[in-house]
Amino acid sequence: MLPEAQLVPFPDSPSRPLDGVRVLDLTSAVAGPVATQLLGALGAEVIRIETPWAKPRNPSSALPHRTETPDEPWNREPRQNELANSKRSVALNLTTEAGRETFLDLVEHSDVVLENFSPRVMGNFGLEWDTLRERNSQIVYVSMPAFGKSGPWRDRISYGPGIDAMSGLSWLTGYTDGSPLKPGNFYCDQNAGLLAALSTVAAIMARCRVGGQTVELAMLEGELQLIGDAMVGQQLSGREPTRIGNEHTSAAPHGVYPAAPLLGNPDSWIAIACRDDVEWQALLRVWRDDAVRADRRFATGLRRWKHRAELDALLRNWTECQDPETLAERLQRAGVPASAVMGPRALLRDEQVQARQSVGGLDHPQVGLSPAPQAAFRLSRTPAPPSSAAPLFAADTVPAMREILGYSEKRIAELLQSGAASDRLRERP
Protein backbone atom coordinates (compact mmCIF):
# COMPACT_ATOMS: atom_id res chain seq x y z
CA MET A 1 0.00 0.00 0.00
CA LEU A 2 1.37 3.39 -0.97
CA PRO A 3 1.54 6.15 1.68
CA GLU A 4 -0.63 9.22 1.44
CA ALA A 5 0.65 12.09 -0.70
CA GLN A 6 2.61 14.60 1.37
CA LEU A 7 3.50 17.89 -0.26
CA VAL A 8 6.35 19.49 1.65
CA PRO A 9 7.42 23.03 0.75
CA PHE A 10 10.80 23.19 -0.95
CA PRO A 11 13.62 24.49 1.26
CA ASP A 12 15.07 27.86 0.40
CA SER A 13 18.51 27.85 -1.20
CA PRO A 14 20.90 30.53 0.09
CA SER A 15 23.01 30.37 -3.07
CA ARG A 16 22.10 29.32 -6.60
CA PRO A 17 24.30 28.94 -9.70
CA LEU A 18 22.69 31.80 -11.66
CA ASP A 19 22.22 34.29 -8.84
CA GLY A 20 22.51 37.81 -10.29
CA VAL A 21 21.45 36.84 -13.83
CA ARG A 22 18.29 38.46 -15.20
CA VAL A 23 16.30 36.86 -18.02
CA LEU A 24 13.54 38.52 -20.04
CA ASP A 25 11.16 35.73 -20.97
CA LEU A 26 9.02 36.29 -24.09
CA THR A 27 8.08 32.64 -24.50
CA SER A 28 4.72 30.88 -24.62
CA ALA A 29 3.29 27.35 -25.01
CA VAL A 30 5.66 24.72 -23.46
CA ALA A 31 9.21 24.62 -24.87
CA GLY A 32 10.24 28.18 -24.03
CA PRO A 33 8.62 28.21 -20.57
CA VAL A 34 10.43 24.94 -19.74
CA ALA A 35 13.75 26.62 -20.55
CA THR A 36 13.09 29.74 -18.49
CA GLN A 37 11.60 27.75 -15.60
CA LEU A 38 14.86 25.81 -15.33
CA LEU A 39 16.89 29.03 -15.48
CA GLY A 40 14.69 30.44 -12.74
CA ALA A 41 15.22 27.40 -10.51
CA LEU A 42 18.96 27.80 -11.08
CA GLY A 43 18.72 31.28 -9.59
CA ALA A 44 18.13 33.63 -12.51
CA GLU A 45 15.57 36.38 -12.04
CA VAL A 46 13.16 35.46 -14.82
CA ILE A 47 10.72 38.18 -15.85
CA ARG A 48 7.85 36.96 -18.02
CA ILE A 49 6.91 39.67 -20.52
CA GLU A 50 3.24 39.08 -21.22
CA THR A 51 0.69 40.87 -23.37
CA PRO A 52 -1.86 42.70 -21.17
CA TRP A 53 -4.69 40.52 -22.56
CA ALA A 54 -2.66 37.28 -22.75
CA LYS A 55 -4.90 35.11 -20.53
CA PRO A 56 -8.41 33.78 -21.10
CA ARG A 57 -10.60 35.08 -18.31
CA ASN A 58 -12.32 31.75 -17.74
CA PRO A 59 -10.01 28.87 -18.69
CA SER A 60 -11.82 25.55 -18.87
CA SER A 61 -9.27 23.80 -16.65
CA ALA A 62 -8.88 26.29 -13.79
CA LEU A 63 -7.78 24.76 -10.48
CA PRO A 64 -10.08 25.19 -7.45
CA HIS A 65 -10.02 28.55 -5.69
CA ARG A 66 -8.85 27.64 -2.19
CA THR A 67 -7.97 30.88 -0.44
CA GLU A 68 -9.59 34.13 0.60
CA THR A 69 -7.88 36.04 -2.22
CA PRO A 70 -9.85 37.43 -5.21
CA ASP A 71 -11.25 34.80 -7.56
CA GLU A 72 -9.15 35.15 -10.73
CA PRO A 73 -9.42 31.93 -12.76
CA TRP A 74 -6.67 32.99 -15.18
CA ASN A 75 -4.20 32.72 -12.31
CA ARG A 76 -5.27 29.12 -11.60
CA GLU A 77 -4.74 27.50 -15.00
CA PRO A 78 -2.74 24.25 -14.46
CA ARG A 79 -0.10 24.69 -17.15
CA GLN A 80 0.53 28.26 -16.04
CA ASN A 81 1.16 27.01 -12.52
CA GLU A 82 3.33 24.17 -13.77
CA LEU A 83 5.59 26.16 -16.09
CA ALA A 84 5.68 29.65 -14.57
CA ASN A 85 7.10 28.89 -11.14
CA SER A 86 10.33 30.67 -10.17
CA LYS A 87 9.34 33.66 -12.35
CA ARG A 88 7.91 37.19 -12.18
CA SER A 89 5.17 38.63 -14.42
CA VAL A 90 5.28 41.98 -16.23
CA ALA A 91 2.61 42.98 -18.77
CA LEU A 92 3.76 45.17 -21.68
CA ASN A 93 2.13 45.97 -25.00
CA LEU A 94 5.10 45.69 -27.37
CA THR A 95 3.06 46.98 -30.30
CA THR A 96 3.16 50.45 -28.72
CA GLU A 97 6.23 52.66 -28.82
CA ALA A 98 6.12 53.23 -25.07
CA GLY A 99 5.82 49.50 -24.37
CA ARG A 100 8.69 48.74 -26.74
CA GLU A 101 10.89 51.40 -25.08
CA THR A 102 10.09 50.04 -21.64
CA PHE A 103 11.16 46.60 -22.81
CA LEU A 104 14.42 47.99 -24.24
CA ASP A 105 15.06 49.74 -20.93
CA LEU A 106 14.72 46.34 -19.27
CA VAL A 107 17.16 44.91 -21.84
CA GLU A 108 19.77 47.41 -20.62
CA HIS A 109 19.46 45.90 -17.14
CA SER A 110 19.30 42.24 -18.18
CA ASP A 111 21.57 39.43 -19.29
CA VAL A 112 19.32 37.28 -21.50
CA VAL A 113 16.35 37.71 -23.81
CA LEU A 114 14.67 34.40 -24.66
CA GLU A 115 11.80 33.97 -27.13
CA ASN A 116 10.17 31.16 -29.11
CA PHE A 117 8.34 33.15 -31.79
CA SER A 118 8.52 32.42 -35.48
CA PRO A 119 11.50 34.35 -36.95
CA ARG A 120 9.50 37.31 -38.28
CA VAL A 121 7.86 38.33 -34.98
CA MET A 122 10.74 40.10 -33.24
CA GLY A 123 11.32 42.08 -36.43
CA ASN A 124 7.67 43.10 -36.43
CA PHE A 125 8.16 44.44 -32.90
CA GLY A 126 11.33 46.26 -33.98
CA LEU A 127 13.32 44.17 -31.52
CA GLU A 128 15.86 42.40 -33.74
CA TRP A 129 19.29 41.39 -32.47
CA ASP A 130 20.97 44.59 -33.70
CA THR A 131 18.46 46.72 -31.78
CA LEU A 132 18.95 44.73 -28.58
CA ARG A 133 22.74 44.85 -28.95
CA GLU A 134 22.69 48.63 -29.35
CA ARG A 135 21.10 48.90 -25.92
CA ASN A 136 23.23 46.19 -24.28
CA SER A 137 26.34 44.82 -25.98
CA GLN A 138 26.52 41.98 -23.45
CA ILE A 139 23.00 40.68 -24.00
CA VAL A 140 22.52 37.00 -24.85
CA TYR A 141 19.62 36.62 -27.29
CA VAL A 142 18.12 33.12 -27.41
CA SER A 143 15.53 32.20 -30.04
CA MET A 144 13.69 28.90 -30.41
CA PRO A 145 12.09 28.81 -33.88
CA ALA A 146 10.39 25.60 -34.92
CA PHE A 147 12.61 24.99 -37.97
CA GLY A 148 15.43 27.54 -37.64
CA LYS A 149 16.04 31.02 -39.01
CA SER A 150 17.19 29.84 -42.43
CA GLY A 151 16.04 27.36 -45.04
CA PRO A 152 12.78 27.06 -46.97
CA TRP A 153 10.72 26.40 -43.81
CA ARG A 154 12.07 29.42 -41.94
CA ASP A 155 8.69 31.12 -41.48
CA ARG A 156 6.59 28.03 -40.85
CA ILE A 157 4.83 27.80 -37.51
CA SER A 158 4.60 24.59 -35.50
CA TYR A 159 3.98 23.25 -32.03
CA GLY A 160 5.36 20.06 -30.53
CA PRO A 161 3.04 17.59 -32.36
CA GLY A 162 4.06 19.05 -35.72
CA ILE A 163 7.73 18.72 -34.83
CA ASP A 164 7.08 15.15 -33.64
CA ALA A 165 5.71 14.36 -37.11
CA MET A 166 8.43 16.18 -39.02
CA SER A 167 11.30 14.71 -36.97
CA GLY A 168 10.36 11.06 -37.44
CA LEU A 169 9.43 10.50 -33.79
CA SER A 170 5.74 9.98 -34.60
CA TRP A 171 6.71 7.55 -37.38
CA LEU A 172 8.47 5.39 -34.79
CA THR A 173 5.70 5.68 -32.19
CA GLY A 174 2.88 3.15 -32.30
CA TYR A 175 2.20 -0.55 -32.63
CA THR A 176 3.47 -2.89 -35.33
CA ASP A 177 0.12 -3.16 -37.08
CA GLY A 178 -0.99 0.43 -36.45
CA SER A 179 -0.53 3.96 -37.71
CA PRO A 180 2.02 6.52 -36.50
CA LEU A 181 1.04 8.14 -33.21
CA LYS A 182 1.77 11.38 -31.44
CA PRO A 183 3.97 10.61 -28.40
CA GLY A 184 1.99 10.76 -25.19
CA ASN A 185 3.78 13.78 -23.76
CA PHE A 186 5.63 16.93 -24.86
CA TYR A 187 8.94 15.24 -25.64
CA CYS A 188 9.80 17.81 -28.30
CA ASP A 189 9.07 20.76 -26.03
CA GLN A 190 10.79 19.35 -22.97
CA ASN A 191 13.87 18.40 -24.99
CA ALA A 192 14.04 21.81 -26.68
CA GLY A 193 13.60 23.56 -23.34
CA LEU A 194 16.47 21.66 -21.75
CA LEU A 195 18.74 22.35 -24.75
CA ALA A 196 17.81 26.03 -24.71
CA ALA A 197 18.61 26.32 -21.00
CA LEU A 198 21.94 24.54 -21.49
CA SER A 199 22.96 26.72 -24.44
CA THR A 200 21.89 29.86 -22.55
CA VAL A 201 24.17 28.98 -19.64
CA ALA A 202 27.01 28.29 -22.10
CA ALA A 203 26.54 31.69 -23.75
CA ILE A 204 26.50 33.42 -20.35
CA MET A 205 29.77 31.70 -19.43
CA ALA A 206 31.36 32.82 -22.71
CA ARG A 207 30.43 36.51 -22.34
CA CYS A 208 33.65 37.44 -20.58
CA ARG A 209 35.54 36.27 -23.69
CA VAL A 210 33.28 37.11 -26.63
CA GLY A 211 30.60 39.44 -25.27
CA GLY A 212 26.93 39.02 -26.07
CA GLN A 213 25.79 36.68 -28.82
CA THR A 214 22.76 35.02 -30.35
CA VAL A 215 21.72 31.45 -29.61
CA GLU A 216 19.47 29.75 -32.14
CA LEU A 217 17.78 26.51 -31.16
CA ALA A 218 15.72 24.94 -33.95
CA MET A 219 13.21 22.66 -32.23
CA LEU A 220 13.30 20.25 -35.17
CA GLU A 221 17.06 19.79 -34.85
CA GLY A 222 16.70 19.23 -31.12
CA GLU A 223 14.28 16.38 -31.70
CA LEU A 224 16.33 14.81 -34.48
CA GLN A 225 18.81 13.88 -31.76
CA LEU A 226 16.18 11.62 -30.19
CA ILE A 227 16.01 9.30 -33.20
CA GLY A 228 19.67 9.15 -34.14
CA ASP A 229 19.83 5.36 -33.84
CA ALA A 230 16.93 4.96 -36.27
CA MET A 231 18.59 7.21 -38.85
CA VAL A 232 21.92 5.41 -38.54
CA GLY A 233 20.19 2.04 -38.77
CA GLN A 234 18.34 3.04 -41.93
CA GLN A 235 21.49 4.43 -43.51
CA LEU A 236 23.51 1.29 -42.77
CA SER A 237 20.87 -1.34 -43.54
CA GLY A 238 18.70 0.41 -46.11
CA ARG A 239 15.59 -0.73 -44.22
CA GLU A 240 12.96 1.68 -42.90
CA PRO A 241 12.61 1.37 -39.10
CA THR A 242 9.24 -0.02 -38.02
CA ARG A 243 6.94 0.69 -35.12
CA ILE A 244 7.24 -1.88 -32.34
CA GLY A 245 4.98 -0.59 -29.57
CA ASN A 246 6.23 -1.88 -26.22
CA GLU A 247 8.40 -4.57 -27.79
CA HIS A 248 12.19 -4.55 -28.12
CA THR A 249 14.27 -5.29 -31.19
CA SER A 250 16.00 -8.24 -29.50
CA ALA A 251 14.77 -8.77 -25.92
CA ALA A 252 11.74 -10.79 -24.79
CA PRO A 253 9.68 -10.66 -22.72
CA HIS A 254 9.67 -6.87 -22.95
CA GLY A 255 6.42 -5.01 -22.44
CA VAL A 256 3.65 -3.69 -20.27
CA TYR A 257 1.26 -6.30 -18.90
CA PRO A 258 -2.13 -6.04 -17.15
CA ALA A 259 -2.19 -6.46 -13.38
CA ALA A 260 -4.70 -6.64 -10.55
CA PRO A 261 -6.21 -3.30 -9.49
CA LEU A 262 -3.83 -0.85 -7.80
CA LEU A 263 -5.40 1.47 -5.19
CA GLY A 264 -8.81 0.46 -6.48
CA ASN A 265 -7.95 1.47 -10.04
CA PRO A 266 -8.95 -1.26 -12.52
CA ASP A 267 -6.53 0.15 -15.11
CA SER A 268 -3.38 -1.35 -13.52
CA TRP A 269 -0.24 -2.49 -15.34
CA ILE A 270 3.30 -3.69 -14.74
CA ALA A 271 6.33 -3.23 -16.98
CA ILE A 272 8.73 -6.20 -17.23
CA ALA A 273 11.91 -6.58 -19.30
CA CYS A 274 14.29 -9.52 -19.65
CA ARG A 275 17.41 -8.67 -21.62
CA ASP A 276 19.29 -11.95 -21.24
CA ASP A 277 19.15 -15.51 -19.92
CA VAL A 278 20.14 -14.44 -16.40
CA GLU A 279 17.12 -12.14 -16.09
CA TRP A 280 14.90 -14.78 -17.74
CA GLN A 281 15.90 -17.36 -15.17
CA ALA A 282 15.27 -14.82 -12.41
CA LEU A 283 11.77 -14.21 -13.82
CA LEU A 284 11.09 -17.95 -13.84
CA ARG A 285 12.05 -18.25 -10.17
CA VAL A 286 9.29 -15.77 -9.32
CA TRP A 287 6.82 -16.98 -11.95
CA ARG A 288 7.08 -20.65 -10.87
CA ASP A 289 5.42 -22.06 -14.00
CA ASP A 290 6.94 -25.47 -14.80
CA ALA A 291 5.31 -25.62 -18.25
CA VAL A 292 6.87 -22.32 -19.28
CA ARG A 293 10.24 -23.35 -17.86
CA ALA A 294 10.19 -26.58 -19.89
CA ASP A 295 8.89 -25.01 -23.11
CA ARG A 296 11.65 -25.24 -25.76
CA ARG A 297 10.24 -22.20 -27.54
CA PHE A 298 11.61 -20.07 -24.68
CA ALA A 299 14.93 -21.84 -24.09
CA THR A 300 17.14 -19.09 -25.56
CA GLY A 301 16.92 -15.36 -26.06
CA LEU A 302 16.49 -15.71 -29.82
CA ARG A 303 13.72 -18.30 -29.43
CA ARG A 304 11.93 -16.15 -26.86
CA TRP A 305 12.07 -13.20 -29.23
CA LYS A 306 10.76 -15.24 -32.18
CA HIS A 307 7.87 -16.54 -30.03
CA ARG A 308 7.33 -13.30 -28.10
CA ALA A 309 3.59 -13.15 -28.89
CA GLU A 310 2.97 -16.57 -27.33
CA LEU A 311 5.24 -15.71 -24.40
CA ASP A 312 3.45 -12.41 -23.80
CA ALA A 313 0.09 -14.18 -23.73
CA LEU A 314 1.27 -16.61 -21.06
CA LEU A 315 2.91 -13.86 -19.01
CA ARG A 316 -0.22 -11.75 -19.23
CA ASN A 317 -2.33 -14.59 -17.82
CA TRP A 318 -0.07 -14.60 -14.77
CA THR A 319 0.39 -10.85 -14.18
CA GLU A 320 -3.29 -9.97 -14.42
CA CYS A 321 -3.84 -11.81 -11.12
CA GLN A 322 -0.92 -10.09 -9.37
CA ASP A 323 -0.77 -6.84 -7.42
CA PRO A 324 1.59 -4.68 -9.54
CA GLU A 325 3.45 -3.07 -6.62
CA THR A 326 4.02 -6.36 -4.81
CA LEU A 327 5.04 -8.21 -7.98
CA ALA A 328 7.41 -5.44 -9.04
CA GLU A 329 9.14 -5.60 -5.67
CA ARG A 330 9.49 -9.40 -5.87
CA LEU A 331 10.89 -9.20 -9.41
CA GLN A 332 13.33 -6.44 -8.49
CA ARG A 333 14.63 -8.48 -5.55
CA ALA A 334 15.14 -11.41 -7.93
CA GLY A 335 17.07 -9.22 -10.41
CA VAL A 336 14.39 -8.55 -13.04
CA PRO A 337 13.85 -4.96 -14.26
CA ALA A 338 10.20 -4.31 -13.41
CA SER A 339 7.93 -1.53 -12.19
CA ALA A 340 4.28 -0.88 -11.62
CA VAL A 341 3.00 1.61 -14.21
CA MET A 342 2.41 4.77 -12.20
CA GLY A 343 -0.17 7.45 -12.83
CA PRO A 344 0.13 10.95 -11.31
CA ARG A 345 -1.89 9.98 -8.22
CA ALA A 346 0.32 7.00 -7.47
CA LEU A 347 3.50 8.93 -8.21
CA LEU A 348 2.69 11.59 -5.61
CA ARG A 349 2.39 8.79 -3.04
CA ASP A 350 5.44 6.81 -4.13
CA GLU A 351 7.98 6.30 -1.35
CA GLN A 352 10.97 7.01 -3.61
CA VAL A 353 9.46 10.25 -4.89
CA GLN A 354 8.62 11.32 -1.34
CA ALA A 355 11.98 10.31 0.12
CA ARG A 356 13.89 12.46 -2.37
CA GLN A 357 11.25 15.19 -2.51
CA SER A 358 11.24 14.75 -6.28
CA VAL A 359 7.93 16.61 -6.13
CA GLY A 360 7.48 19.32 -3.55
CA GLY A 361 4.93 21.98 -2.73
CA LEU A 362 4.79 25.60 -3.83
CA ASP A 363 2.40 27.93 -2.02
CA HIS A 364 0.32 29.75 -4.62
CA PRO A 365 -1.74 32.67 -3.25
CA GLN A 366 -4.95 31.58 -4.99
CA VAL A 367 -4.48 27.80 -5.16
CA GLY A 368 -2.65 26.95 -1.96
CA LEU A 369 0.08 24.33 -1.75
CA SER A 370 0.39 22.71 -5.17
CA PRO A 371 2.83 20.09 -6.54
CA ALA A 372 5.91 20.97 -8.58
CA PRO A 373 8.71 18.65 -9.73
CA GLN A 374 12.34 19.37 -8.99
CA ALA A 375 14.93 19.38 -11.73
CA ALA A 376 16.44 15.94 -12.29
CA PHE A 377 19.87 17.00 -10.99
CA ARG A 378 21.05 17.93 -7.48
CA LEU A 379 23.84 20.43 -6.77
CA SER A 380 25.44 19.91 -3.38
CA ARG A 381 26.62 23.48 -2.71
CA THR A 382 24.15 25.51 -4.77
CA PRO A 383 20.81 23.64 -4.63
CA ALA A 384 18.26 24.63 -7.22
CA PRO A 385 14.70 23.61 -6.27
CA PRO A 386 11.85 25.78 -7.59
CA SER A 387 12.00 29.05 -5.70
CA SER A 388 8.41 30.34 -5.86
CA ALA A 389 4.97 29.53 -7.20
CA ALA A 390 3.78 30.96 -10.48
CA PRO A 391 3.23 34.71 -10.20
CA LEU A 392 -0.17 36.34 -10.40
CA PHE A 393 -0.65 37.90 -13.82
CA ALA A 394 1.11 41.29 -14.14
CA ALA A 395 1.89 41.36 -10.42
CA ASP A 396 5.44 42.60 -11.04
CA THR A 397 4.77 45.27 -13.67
CA VAL A 398 4.88 48.21 -11.28
CA PRO A 399 7.59 46.80 -8.95
CA ALA A 400 9.88 46.11 -11.94
CA MET A 401 9.48 49.65 -13.30
CA ARG A 402 10.20 51.05 -9.86
CA GLU A 403 13.00 48.77 -8.69
CA ILE A 404 14.83 47.89 -11.90
CA LEU A 405 14.21 50.91 -14.11
CA GLY A 406 13.79 53.62 -11.46
CA TYR A 407 10.76 55.11 -13.22
CA SER A 408 8.93 57.89 -11.42
CA GLU A 409 5.40 57.33 -10.16
CA LYS A 410 4.19 59.80 -12.78
CA ARG A 411 5.80 57.87 -15.63
CA ILE A 412 4.47 54.56 -14.32
CA ALA A 413 0.96 56.02 -14.12
CA GLU A 414 1.22 57.31 -17.70
CA LEU A 415 2.31 53.88 -19.01
CA LEU A 416 -0.56 52.19 -17.21
CA GLN A 417 -3.07 54.80 -18.38
CA SER A 418 -1.95 54.56 -22.01
CA GLY A 419 -2.12 50.75 -22.08
CA ALA A 420 1.58 50.39 -22.88
CA ALA A 421 1.90 48.53 -19.59
CA SER A 422 -0.62 46.91 -17.30
CA ASP A 423 -0.85 45.75 -13.71
CA ARG A 424 -3.93 43.57 -14.35
CA LEU A 425 -5.55 41.47 -17.06
CA ARG A 426 -7.09 43.69 -19.75
CA GLU A 427 -9.61 43.13 -22.49
CA ARG A 428 -8.17 42.77 -25.97
CA PRO A 429 -8.45 46.19 -27.69
Image (spheres, helix red, strand yellow):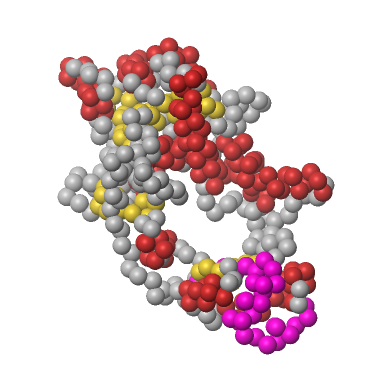
Question: Which picture quadrant has residue 163?
Answer: top right
Is 153 above or below relative to 263?
above
Apparent side of residue 236 relative to residue 108 in the rendered image (left or right): right
Extreme residue toward the front, this view: 381
Residue 96: horizontal and vertical position, in percent?
35, 18
Name the residue located 59 percent from the left edge and 50 percent from the top edge: 182
Quarter of the image that includes the C terminus:
top left
Name the residue located 77 percent from the left edge and 69 percent from the top edge: 302
Tell me if residue 346 is in the magenta stretch. Answer: no
Name the residue located 54 percent from the left edge and 47 percent from the top edge: 187
Q: Nearer the viewer, residue 123 or 333?
A: 333
Q: Nearer the viewer, residue 361 or 277?
A: 277
Chain part drawn in magenta: 268-297
What is the chief secondary structure element of the magenta stretch?
A: helix
Question: Which picture quadrant has residue 179?
Answer: bottom right
Name the residue located 26 percent from the left edge and 23 percent from the top edge: 404
Q: How many marks are shown on the rendered structure?
A: 0
Residue 134: horizontal and vertical position, in percent?
43, 11
Tell me if residue 277 is in the magenta stretch. Answer: yes
Q: Is residue 118 visible?
A: no
Residue 410: horizontal and vertical position, in percent?
17, 16
